[in-house]
Amino acid sequence: MKGQTRAALGIGALTVLLAAVGAGLFVFAGTQIGVYFVVAGIPVVLLLVAVAYVRGVLSGEDNTGQYVEQRTKQVGESLRDFWRSLSTIEESYPRFDAGTLRSRADSLVSDYEAQGGEFDRSSGSFSVGKGASSGELQELERIDAEVTTLAADRDDQLYDFVRDELDALHGDLLALADADIASDPVAPPEPPTPDEGAPSGLAYWEAVGEDLAEYRTEADATVDEAIARVRDIQRNATDTYDEAAVDRHLEDAEADRRDGEYGHAVDAVLEARATLESELSGSFDKDREDLDAFVDTILDSGAEQYVDAELFDQVRSVQRELDALDSALDVGSLSEHRQTVRTAALDIVSALQREVDRHVERLAGEDLPAGYYSRPAVADEDHGDELRAIGPVRELDREWASVVADLVDAVGTVKTKATVVEAYGDVSETIEQELRRNGSVTADDLPVRNAGQFFGLYFRRNPDVEFDPDEPALHRGDVETYTVDVTVSYDEGSEAKRRATVMLDGGEYDGREVVETHLVGTATFADVPFGEYDLVVAPGEDDYGRVERSVTVEGDSDLSVDLEPVTLVEQLVGDRRDEIAEHVTEFGPRLRDRFDEEGYLSTEMAFPITDDFVPGLLAEWADREGYTVTRTDDGTVIVYDDSQLSQEIMNVIQYNLDEGDRLSYERIRSQYLSVPVPNPVIEELAASTGLSVETTPDSLLKPAGGEA
C-alpha cells in the first residue's frame, strides 16, 4: 500500500473515531460538552493532522529533488571534462578523427539537457537547470555510465592513432635515410597503453601526446636536414633544370612539415630530389606518357577491392586531367599530378601491406597443419620505403606493379585463409555433423563461401576423410547409425493400457512408434543416423501433456520422458490465460452462434483472430460453457457437447450395430456422429455407455447374444 493511501485511510479512521467520541460525550457527558467537542475539537484535531501530513510529504519531495540535482551536477561535471578533453585533443591532433566520439557525446548532452541540465557546447560548460529536480535518476545514472565508456573508447582510439602516427613517422624518416639525404632515424618510443594508464598527474591523452610530440621534434630535425641537403645539391647543379618546380616541392615540404604532414613532406623532398636527378629539360612528353601509363597500371592492378576507394578516386581525377597537359609550361601541374599519383600509389602499397600483415598476424597465432598455409614472402618485406625512394615514374611503375601484384595475390590468399581459420570452429562442427549423418559433405551443405578452403583444412586435420578438391567435397564412407530407446513413464498406473505416440524426426529420418502401457513403456528406434532430432511424445489421453524436446543422437541412447497430468485446457491456454480470457469475453457470442450452427467448434474453422490464439480461445470458452475439449493426432482442437455425443454413440450401438457385427470408428464418425472426434474419444464414450459392446482401438464389436 502506498504512503498516500495509508495516510488517507488513517485520516478517515481518525475521523470515525472522533465522531464516535463525540457521540459518546452526547450520551454520557451531556449535550453541551458534546457540542463543544464536535464544533471545536474535531476540526482542530483534523487540521493538525493534515498540516503534519503535508509537511512530511513536502519534506520527502524536497529531499529527493535535492539528490537528483546533486547527481545532475555530478553528471554535468563528467560531461564537461570529457567534452573539453575532446576539444583539446582535436586542437592538438587535427588528423585525429573524433567525429564519432563527438557525435556520441553530443547525443549524451541532449539526453542530459532532457533531464534538466544545461550545457554550452561551444565552451563545454554546464549548469543545473531549474527543472533538474524533476529529472529521472535512472536516466542520469545511464548517462554517467555511458560517459565513462566513451572516455575509455577515446583512450583506445587515441592510443591506436598515436601508434600509427609514430610508425608512419618512422617509415617516412627511413625513406629519407635510404635516399641518402638524412641520417638514420632513432626508433619511435612506445606509448603507454590505456590499461597501463598515464603517469601520476597526467591525463592519458596528455601522456601519449608527449611521446608523439617528442618524436615529431625528431622528425622536424630530420626533414629540415633532408631539405638542406637537396638545396645544397641545387646550389652545386650545373645542368639546366626546372628550378621553380624544385623550389616549390621544397617549400611544400617545409609547409607540410610545419602542418605536421610528415608523409607529404617526405614525398615532396623526394620528388624535388628526383626532379634534380632526372633533369626534366626536354622530357615533358615522356614524363606525361610515363605518368599516364602508371595511372593505367594502378587502375588495372586489382588492388581497389582491398583498399580505400578514395585513393583510386584521386588517381582517376589525375587521369581525367592529364590530357589537358599539352605544353612543357605545364611541368608544374604535371609535377603536382605526379605527386598526387605517387602519394596515392604509395598509400595503396601501405594499405595492402597492412592488410597482409593483419591477416598474417592472425594466422601466426593458429596451430595450422602442414600444407594448408605458407607465410607469403611479402609479409617479411617492406616495399614502401624502397618505392618512395624511386624517382623516375617509369621505374616506379614497373616496380610498383610487381610489388602490388604480389601484395594483391597475398591479400587474397591470407584473407581467405584467415577468414576460414576464424570461422573454422563453427563450420567444422557442421562438416562433422554432415559426415556423421550422410557420410559426405559438399559445398551446398555449408552456408559459407570458400567451402573448398574449409574442406582442405578439415582434411589436413582429419586424415580419415577423403578430399575431392574439384567438386569440392569430403567423403568418409558409411553413415554411423545408432539405436535410440525412449522410455515413457506415467505418473501412476491404470487399469487399462494407455497409448502414447513417440516420434523422432530430423533430416531424412522420421520415426514413429506407439507405446501401450499401464505405467511404463519403451519405444525403440533402430538405425538412427547421427544428428539433431525433435523428440515428441503425444499421449492418447487429453489429461496428459504432450512433451517436445530436441535431442542429439551421437551414439546408442536411452532417453526418458515423464508424462505429467495436465488438463487439455491448461495445455492449450498455457501462460496466456488473462489475455485469452479477454478474447473469450469479446468473441464469446460469436463462438456460441457458431457452436449452435455447427454443433461443435474446431481449429479447422476460420476465426477473426490470430491462428496461434484459436486453440486456447476455444479451450477457455469450452471450459466456461461446460463443454468438452479434445485434440486429434494432427493437433486439431475440437469442442463438443459430451452428453450429446454420448447419446449419438449409444444410438449407434443400439440401432446400427447387430450382434456379432463390427463397426469401424471411421465409419461411425463419417455416418452417424455430428462431431469428427478422434478414435480414443469414441472408444471411451462407447465403453462408458454400459451397453454390451466390446471396444478396440479402431472399432466396436457387439458380441453375439449381447443385450442392448
Image: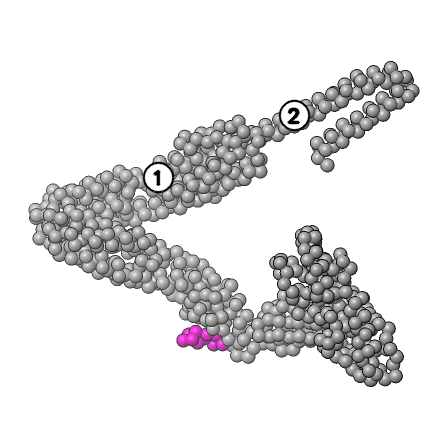
Residue 403 drawn above or below residue 177:
below
Q: Which residue is mark 2?
A: 59
* Closer to the camera in the image, 152 or 198: 152
> Is 9 situated left or right of 121 in this image?
right
For the point 39% across and 56% down, which residue is it?
Answer: 358
> Is 619 situated left or right of 28 in this image?
left
In the rendered image, residue 59, in percent from the top left (x then y), is placed at 65, 25
Disc 1 and disc 2: Cα gap in Å? 51 Å
For the point 87% across and 77% down, which residue is it?
Answer: 708
Mark before the other along the chain sequence, 1 or 2: 2
Give the SS element for disc 2.
Answer: helix
Residue type beneath disc 2: Ser
For the point 87% across and 15% down, which residue is it?
Answer: 32
Residue 427 drawn above or below residue 477:
above
Q: Which residues are magenta?
A: 463-475
* Closer to the camera in the image, 17 or 178: 17
In the rendered image, residue 212, in percent from the top left (x then y), is placed at 35, 40
Residue 507 drawn above or below residue 134:
below
Residue 93 marker: 1
* Closer to the camera in the image, 692 or 411: 692
> Is 458 situated left or right of 177 in this image?
right
As drawn, the residue found furthest toward the right would be 28
